[in-house]
Amino acid sequence: MSKSKNIEMITGDPKKAIIKLAVPMMISMLLIMLYNIADSVWVAGLGGDALAAIGFITPLFMVLVGLGNGIGAGANSLIARNIGAKNHAQANNAALHAIVLSVIVSVVFTILIEAFMVPILKFMGAGSTIGYAMNYSYIIFGFLLIFVYSGVASAIFRSEGDMRRATIAIAITAILNIILDPIFIYVLNFGIEGAAWATVISATLSCIIMSYWIWGKKDLYLDLSPKNFSYSSKIMIDTLQVAIPSTLETIIFSALAIIINSMLVIASGTDAVAVYTASMRIVQLAMIPLHNYKNLQTAHSYSIKIGFAISVLLGLLMFIFSSQIAAMFSYTEASAVLAPEIATAISVLSLFVLAIPHGIMSSMMFQGVGKGTYSLLITLLRSLILETVFAYIFCFIFGWGVVGIYSGVIIGCFVGGTIGYIWAKFFIRKFREISIRKYGHKEE
């Protein structure tokens, strides 16, 4: 697709844009989930402690990825709005600001995370898994720049509707990681460090290719030549207005995961964290349709309907085949004991897809119009407050154990998402007036 057609598509009919952009984005999410699952499946062969270590590191890794995705979300929103306003120079400058920002935050957070890794893992209750967790985390977080930059570069392609290359970049990372995992973990006998190196090498190759497209091939709608960079505090602030809430949302999800992991350790030990890690990687596959294109009014309802229908189908399949899926994580003697518990967790958590579509789509809608704080508040209520409260009540007060934690996550997500959905509907009613006042034109 030519760059002019990309722009016509994202500024045209919302329904057509959703259909054309949703499929590549769902493929991208599928690939990301598959390589996350591949990590878990191959690491599971090392035993429950190794798999649990991945579970303890995942929340921190979410923060790492969230840094890039947050800056990317801020840049995406600002670039798309400037493209819509036909301000090509500002769109270029916004993208360049995002790249500079990615370098700055990567350096700062690499130092902070590496310095405080051990006390963080102890605080999370890593216990006997801390050795595995440290070996994995020092490698992953040592290459923070790769992951942050990857999120920003991918967002730049998406901002001008170039989903093909954004998807190709993710596909390269995912497929290469899936291939390298067993080689580095078992053939080269690197163990859990092999999984980390496979992830870093895969992401690095993807970044090199995206950089070539941006500065070597130079066939984007945007022109990211250094000469087009002119520091602007306004652009930085506008980017951060979406980037900070978006990143904080990721931190909220990470905090929730830390809390849930702590509850699981208290309720049933570190093996419960391994079970939860494996099952949630599978259940997240059914959430893929929920991460498609964002727009307003028609697009808001249309996206929820599509995401809900496909997610329910995938969730049903996971419920039916939970035992067979669990077997993927129990192919060695060290991990065989986890299979029944993983099957139970997948069966319960597959209901999660019924609770999340309306909430997450409403959050994405707010991000798309630059209201990142609203999205943050919805996520804070849904994830950190309600899911935690319900999980605690069902597990410890009602005495349901780990199943109570799973149930609490589902109920809390549904209640919080419903509140977010109602808020989004009220906002959309007033959006025409906001659009005229802010952008000087009437939203169709």
Image (cartoon, rainbow, N blue to C red):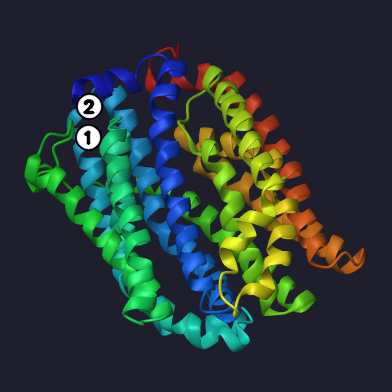
Seen in the picture, residue 89 relative to 266 is either above or below; the reply is above
- In the picture, measured across the screen, residue 379 lies left or right of residue 432, that is right
Which quarter of the rendering shows the N terminus?
Answer: top left
Residue 240 on image: x %, y %? 39, 49
Residue 87, label in figure: 2
CB contact under 8 Å: marks 2 and 1: yes
Q: Residues within 10 Å of mark 1 (few under 14, many from 20)?
A: many
Residue 112 on image: x %, y %? 40, 77
Q: Residue at x 63, y 44 (%)?
A: 378
- In the picture, measured across the screen, residue 357 lies left or right of residue 372, that is right
Could you tell me which secondary element the residue under label 1 belongs to?
helix
Question: Who is closer to the viewer here, 36 or 435?
Answer: 36
Residue 41 on image: x %, y %? 51, 65
Question: Who is closer to the viewer here, 79 or 176?
Answer: 176
Q: How many marks?
A: 2
Q: Is residue 139 visible?
A: yes
Residue 218, label in figure: none
Q: Label 1, on which residue?
A: 90
Residue 274 on image: x %, y %? 62, 71
Seen in the picture, residue 408 relative to 315 is either above or below; the reply is below
Determine which quarter of the picture holds residue 12.
Answer: top left
Question: Who is closer to the viewer here, 316 or 212?
Answer: 316
Residue type of the residue flagged with mark 1: Gln
Q: Residue at x 58, y 31 (%)?
A: 307
Q: Is residue 238 visible?
A: no
Q: Residue at x 20, y 48 (%)?
A: 210
